[in-house]
Image: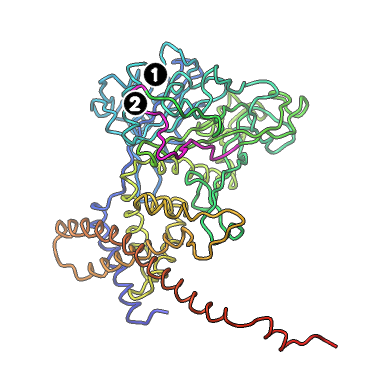
Amino acid sequence: MLDDKQTQLNLRVSDQLRSQYPIIMPWRRPCPQKILIVTDGYSGQFLNGSFNNYYFGLSAVIDTLLDQTDYYVSFKLTLAHRQIDSNKPAGPITSPAYQRYGPNFENFRFNAAANDIKTGKVFNINDYDQIWLFGVRDNVDDVQKLSDLELPILTEWMENGGGVFATGDHADLGASLCGRVPRVSKMRKWSVAQNPPSPVGLDRHDTLDNGHDDIYTFDDESDDIPMKISPKYYNNIAWHPFFGKKHPHPVLCGKDGVIDILPDHPHEGEIIAENLVVINQNLVNGNPEFPQIAGNDFRPEVIARAHVKGDHTNQSDTNKGAANAKTFGAIGAYDGYRTDVGRVVVDSTWHHWFDVNLIGRPVAYLNTPPYDQTNPKTQGFLASPQGIVAYNRIQNYFINVGLWLAPKSDRLCMLKGLLWTYVMKTPFVERFKIDMPIIQFGSYAYDALGRIAGQCNVRSWIFDVYPIEVKKSFEEMRIKLPDTCLTCPPEELLEIYALGAMTKNLLELAYKLQDEKEGNEKLEKMITKEIDERTVNGLQEGYNLMVRDLTKSIKLTTEHLSKASKVDCVTSITRRFPRAK
C-alpha cells in the first residue's frame, strides 16, 4: 500500500508523462519493420494475387499490419507484383486507396533497378527487414520463376539476417516464386518432385469445418467459424518436469492466450516434418543452407499442425466428397538467430491470409443461398461477434509473424519501446514505489507486457538480447525424468528480475522528468540516451541480482536443511507416536 505522499508523486509523474506525450514520443517512435510483400499470378485471370480487396487479395492483412496500435513497433509495407495486379485500385496513384492497396512495383524482379511507382525510389533489397512471399503461380520451372539472377541477391540478404515468410497452396501452387528460395524450399512441399497434397481425392488436406449445418460446402471457408490447430508446446525450465509449464512458439503466443485457430480451406499444402528436412546442402554462395554449430542439429520445425476431420463422406461433403482423417504440418519456423542468419516462417496455404477466408466471399462465388449480400459468408469473420473475436486472434498471428521475423538487432529496440510506452506512460506507473523489491517491479511489468505483446514474445525478446551464454546456461539446466533439480531457476525468474531492474531504472528517469526545465530538443536527446543506457544496464543488473539472490537462497536453504538432517526422525516419531496396543 503506497503512502499518500508516494501516491501523489506517482500521479504527478504519470500526469507529467501524459502531458509530455507529443514531446517524448517523437524520439521513442515505434521500431519500424520494413516489409516487402511480393505476390504473383496470372494477370487478367482469376488465379492472380492482389493487394486490393479481392478473392485472392491481401487487403485484410495490409489493414491488420498498418492499423495495429501498439507503439513499440510499426510496419512499413512495400507491395510488389511479379506480373500485373489486375485488381489494383482504380484512380490516380495519389489516391488514398492506391496508396494503401496499390502495388509499388509491377513486373517486379529482385535484380531489376525499378522505380517505386508511389515514391520514385529505386529498389534496393537492403532497404527491407523482411520479405513476405505469397506464391500463386505453379511450376518450379515456370518461365517467370524466381530466376538464377535473382537467387543470389535474395540469398545474400537472408544470410545477412533478413527474415522471410512464404506460402502457397495445394499441389505446386507457389512453386514459381518460392520453390527455389533458400531454406524455404526445404521446409514446405512446393514442387511436384516433393509430392505435395492434391486438391482432390481422399488424401487432400481438407480442413473445412462444416459450419452452421451438417453439410460441407466450398463456401464454408468464408463463414465465421475457424478451424482448430494444434500448436507445438515447449517445456519451460522447472525444478521437476512434472511441475513445469509449457508455452507455444512466439508466433502463436497471443495477447489473450495461445493462438490455436486459423481460417479453414478444403485443399491445403503441407509443411515438411522436422526429421524429413534436408539440411546438408549448400547455398549458391557455397555456405551451408542450415548452418550447424558445435554439432548442434539446428533444424526447422513444425510449430502447428492442422487436421482433416473424419466425417467427410460422399454424402456429407457436397464439395469434394470423402476424405481421410489425418494431421499435417500447417506452420513451420526456422530460428536463424542461432546461427546468425535470417529467420523463416512458412504456412501451408495462403488461404489463412487471403480476403476470401477472412472478410468474406464475393457473391459470384457463393455455393449456398441466399445468393446476395445478405449471405453472412460475404462478410467472413466479420459476420458475428464470435467471428470478430476469432478474427482478432488470427490477426494476432499475422502481427506475430512480423515480430518474430524482425532482425536480431531490432529486438532490443522493441523491448525498450514496450517498457517505456506501456509501463512508464500508462497508469501502471501509479502502482510503483521506488523502493519496492526488484522482483515486485518485475512481476508487475511481466503481467502488463504479457497482456500487450504476449508473454512468449516478451520472453523471446529478453533471451534474444542477452548474450548467448545466458540462454545456453538455462537450456543446459533443462532436466528430464526422472532427474530433479530443486535449485534450477525457471526462465520466468530471469525475465522478472530483468524486467524489474529495467522498470526501476526507467521509473527513476520518469521521476527525473518532473523537474526537467530544458527545451524540447535537449529533453529528447537526454531521454534517447538515458532510455538506452538504463535499459541495457537493467538487463545486467537484473541478471546479477538474480544470481545474488539465488546464491543467497541456496546457502540459507542448505544451512537450515543441514540442521534438520541431524535429527533422528525414526526415533522421534516412534517415541511420539507409539504403536497402538
What residue sits right under mark 2 in the picture?
154
Q: Is residue 64 above or below residue 56?
A: below
Q: Residue at x 25, y 23 (%)?
A: 115
Q: Which stretch did the figure color magenta?
A: 284-305
Q: Residue at x 49, y 65 (%)?
A: 487
Please state which amino acid type lies under the numbered disc 1.
Leu
Q: Are marks 2 and 1 in contact (CB under 8 Å)?
A: yes
- Residue 346 place in picture, x, y as percent: 48, 33
Front residue of 220 and 522: 522
Residue 210 located left or right of residue 55: right
Q: Is residue 85 above or below residue 17?
A: above
Front residue of 459 and 575: 575
How far apart are the alpha carbons under marks 2 and 1? Answer: 10 Å
What residue sits right under mark 1 in the picture?
146
Secondary structure beneath dot 1 equals loop
- Magenta stretch: dominant SS? loop
Mark 1 closeness class: few <14, some 14–19, many ≥20 residues within 10 Å: many
